[in-house]
Amino acid sequence: MDTNSVLAIEGGVPVNQEPWPSTMIGPEAIGDEEIAAVTAVLRSKKLFRFLDAEHSRCAALERHFREMTGSKHALAVGGGTSALICGLTGTGVGDGDEVIIPAYTYIATAAAVLICGGLPVIAEIDESLCIDPQAVEALITPRTKAIMPVHMRGYNCDMDAIMGVAARHNLVVIEDTAQACGGSYRGRRLGSFGKAGCFSLQQYKIITAGEGGVIVTNDDEVFERAALRHDSAMCFWSSAGHTVRPFAGENLRMDEMSGALACVQFSRLDGILARCRALRNRVQEGLCGIPGLRIHTPNDPAGDCGISLAMFLPTADSAKQFAQALNAEGIPCGSLYDKGIPDRHIYCHWEYVMEKQSADSSGWPWNSPLHDAGRSYSPEMCPRTLDLLGRTIMLSFSQTYEDRHADLMIAGVRKVAGKLL
Ligand SMILES: *Cc1c(COP(=O)(O)O)cnc(C)c1O
């Protein structure tokens, strides 16, 4: 018997027998430039951005994000969740407001809405693996204030349709671009469509400062309100004066070490995306025409970040089996929804949303008289999302991979598909 044709999971020889390269992206790109930039900040002993505002690395990072997105304003903050909170407060979302978010996003998207006093309303995703604009429209109530499309895994949302829904119903759009920094939709950068675009620079994102985030906007008032939210004394720092009446903020600022690190990482972004896209394209071409295996199509393939390649299998069981077999071949791959693993990127595992829990005994914001007391949540409420994610397996790309790793992915998927599909 030809051992090469026996699946590794059944005792055959794995397609890949060497350690797989790191799947991290930004952190793996850290080199001497990052070390020098952070060290220079430490040597300057000026760690706080407003100490020498003119030479601030946080301010430099904001310039980079303004240029990338073509936005009038950018604000560096301490994390992606902080960026979302600033975006929500910036656009006026608060008690009594409903914000429509996708059923497939990191739990932080829902958390940010709750922290601002709003209620998350959970919409189904479609086959793009991003929020379904039709599902959004069906969920709109008189309390709906905002839509938060999330560009998951580097995939772009259908921004034409979402902006159309928002315009018809006079809603604010806040983009969660935490997982798609540098991506675009029809030639325009993600994060630049909505009233606010929110980025994360956390370890697992495309570029990183360890922790960090950025919010961009074209709107003066949104920017001013976001800045007030991000610093309890912002109204006293800024020399420009304020048109917005000050309110209590919290300290969500970015420090200069993070700013310096993020600036160097930003300079690597185009190269990282080009490499990931080349790897993704190579694998995608190599996987054409496998019966029973359908490759995901982004809303705008040209603007996809190239960090993921999702594939749909006929059933959840076949997806799970496929992922196990491919991992046994030495090719890392995940199935997205597996009832055994509480993945916080899937709404049914957001316990404090499903059970409407609060930070204290008051029950806020769920029980606010301004909210709809009848709004309820259940792990079964978005069956299409669970079905789609259950049938999805995902390959991830990093600039750490060589072409031969892409070829191993192709060989692995073809081998497993040949046996299981
Ligand atoms: C990571 C992430 C966030 C939160 O970012 P942090 O920097 O960890 O606070 C929000 N939304 C999505 C989609 C994310 O992936």
Image (tube, rainbow, N blue to C red):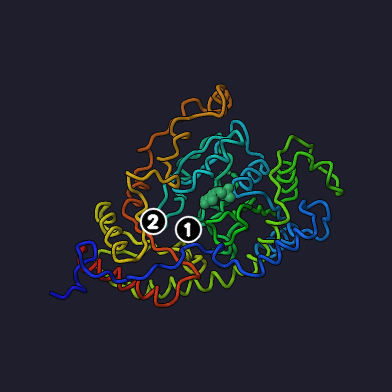
| Mark nearer the N terminus (2 vs 1) | 2
Q: Where is residue 409 shown, x and y percent of the image?
A: 35, 70
Image point 28% across, 56% down: which residue?
319
Q: Which mark is residue 287?
A: none
Relative to 292, say whether 138 is above or below: above
Image point 62% across, 49% down: which residue?
79
Q: In 3D space, how far apart are the residues under numbered discs 2 and 1 (Cα atoms)? A: 14 Å
Q: Quadrant of residue 72?
A: bottom right
Image point 81% across, 61% down: which residue?
55
Task: Give the quadrant of the N terminus.
Answer: bottom left
Q: Where is residue 53 shown, x and y percent of the image?
A: 82, 55
Label 1 belongs to which residue? 153
Q: Where is residue 108 shown, x and y percent of the image?
A: 53, 44
Task: Give the quadrant of the C terminus.
Answer: bottom left
Image point 38% across, 38% down: which residue?
381
Label 2 belongs to which residue? 127
Q: Nearer the viewer, mark 2 or mark 1?
A: 1
